[in-house]
Amino acid sequence: MIARMVNLLLGLAVAGTAFWEPRGSTVFWHDLVIGLVVAGVALVAMAARGVNFLNTALALWLFLSGLIMPVVPHVYVGLVAGVLIFTFSLVSTDDRTFWPVGRRDASRVPERG
């Protein structure tokens, strides 16, 4: 669940960085739309299994889009956000390793002995 929250925040951050570009430019619309779609997919992925792999594909596109639109801020945003979104999109929704509250699943905790 935390991975989905991180992807939600990363998507909103990518959408926010669109405003660094000139309004109406191709890079502006690309970053705004991709960021909002990543955030929306992250929200849906909290409830539906397997939807997070759409963010994997979007992260790959974001990473490679700097080759098509070689604008310096966009290239850096695409590289950093693309790698982070890709990484967090592959984390299972059931993973509670870094969950701040509640208990871990007892079946995943190794026995001491």
Image (cartoon, rainbow, N blue to C red):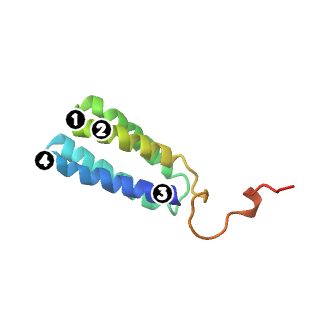
Q: Kindly identify the residue that appears in the image at 43 percent across and 61 percent down.
A: 43
The residue that disc 3 covers is: 4
Q: Foreground mark, 3 or 2?
A: 2
- Residue 85: x percent and y percent? 43, 46
Label 2: how many residues lie within 10 Å, few (<14), some (14-19) or many (20+)?
Answer: some
Which circle marks residue 24 in the picture? Answer: 4
The residue that disc 2 covers is: 76
Three-letter amino acid code at the position of disc 4:
Gly
What is the spatial separation of the Cα atoms under label 1 and label 4, in whole angstroms?
Answer: 17 Å
Q: Please tell me whether mark 4 sits on a helix, a strand or a loop.
A: loop
Label 4: how many residues lie within 10 Å, few (<14), some (14-19) or many (20+)?
Answer: few
The residue that disc 1 covers is: 72
What is the spatial separation of the Cα atoms under label 4 and label 3, in whole angstroms?
Answer: 30 Å
- Residue 78: x percent and y percent? 32, 39
Q: Kindly identify the residue that appears in the image at 23 percent across and 40 percent down.
A: 73
Q: Please tell me whether mark 1 sits on a helix, a strand or a loop.
A: helix
Three-letter amino acid code at the position of disc 3:
Arg
Q: Is residue 107 above or below residue 57?
A: below
What is the spatial separation of the Cα atoms under label 1 and label 2, in whole angstroms?
Answer: 7 Å
In the picture, measured across the screen, residue 86 lies left or right of residue 72, that is right
Q: Foreground mark, 3 or 1?
A: 1
Q: Quadrant of residue 62?
A: top left
State yes or no: discs 1 and 2 in contact (Cβ < 8 Å). yes
